[in-house]
Amino acid sequence: MYTVIGTIKSRGFRVMWMLEEIGQPFEHVPSGPRSAETMKYNPLGKIPALVDGDEVLTDSVAIMTYLGDKHGALTAPAGTPARARQDAMMLWLIDEFDAVLWTYAKHAFVFPEDRRVPEIKDALKAEFERSAAVLSDRLEGPFLMGDEMTIVDIMAVHCLNWSIGAKFPRVDDKLNLWAKGLRERPAFTAVQARA
């Protein structure tokens, strides 16, 4: 059984959602960033962390990729063109969605007040809005990579949810309805129920 260290309202949600989707049992340690409990698993104090036997893995994207490869689920096989396209989409989401949201969070509440640059927040919202329009244009099937759900869908929906909580501009109806459908999946609601 896996153990996930991290709060529901963090990138840990992505890992728990994936584990629910692939039917893998896990224990949840609801530990916040830089807490004493978290530091036991990640000396950087970042969440999430995943314990698999004697191994401790960090970074939500690395964890999801590992789980997908290990269980042959929610990912294209390594070494294939489909995997390269999936990885390209994941890296784009990290750059254009996750990094923008994290930078916004740092300037909204993470950094000490004297290090925040409030003026940057509007530019970050505009950048996210531009990227959301690009993502909407790229969405052609039921999932981002086609007919089957992959880890990039988890990543994208988690970032869209984060943007709602951060009061970013609303995404277009196409993207909103797509994300809403994924939020209605039993695996997603099972993780929410842990809160």
Image: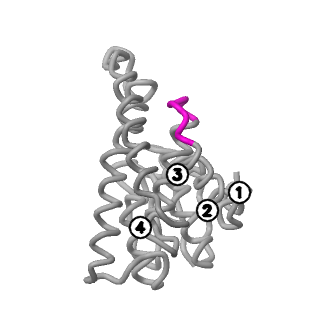
Q: Nearer the viewer, mark 3 or mark 2?
A: 3
The residue drawn where x is 38% and y is 79% is 76
Instruction: Kindly state the secondary structure of the residue where label 4 is placed.
Output: helix
The amino acid beneath tag 2 is His
User: Magenta stretch?
Assistant: 165-172
Residue topped by disc 3: 158
Q: Of circles 1 and 2, which is in front? A: 1
Furthest-right residue in view? 193
- Between 106 and 164, the residue placed more toward the observer is 164
- Which residue is at the front of the view, 63 or 86? 86
Per the picture, the main secondary structure of the magenta-coloured stretch is loop
Q: Is residue 88 left or right of residue 18?
A: left
Gap between marks 4 and 2 measured at Cα: 15 Å
Residue on which disc 2 sits = 28
Q: Earlier in the sequence, mark 1 or mark 2?
A: 2
The residue that label 4 is drawn on is 63
> CB of mark 1 within 8 Å of CB of mark 2?
yes
Type of amino acid at the residue the image marks with label 3: His
The answer to which of marks 3 and 2 sits earlier in the sequence is 2
Residue type pointed to by label 4: Ile
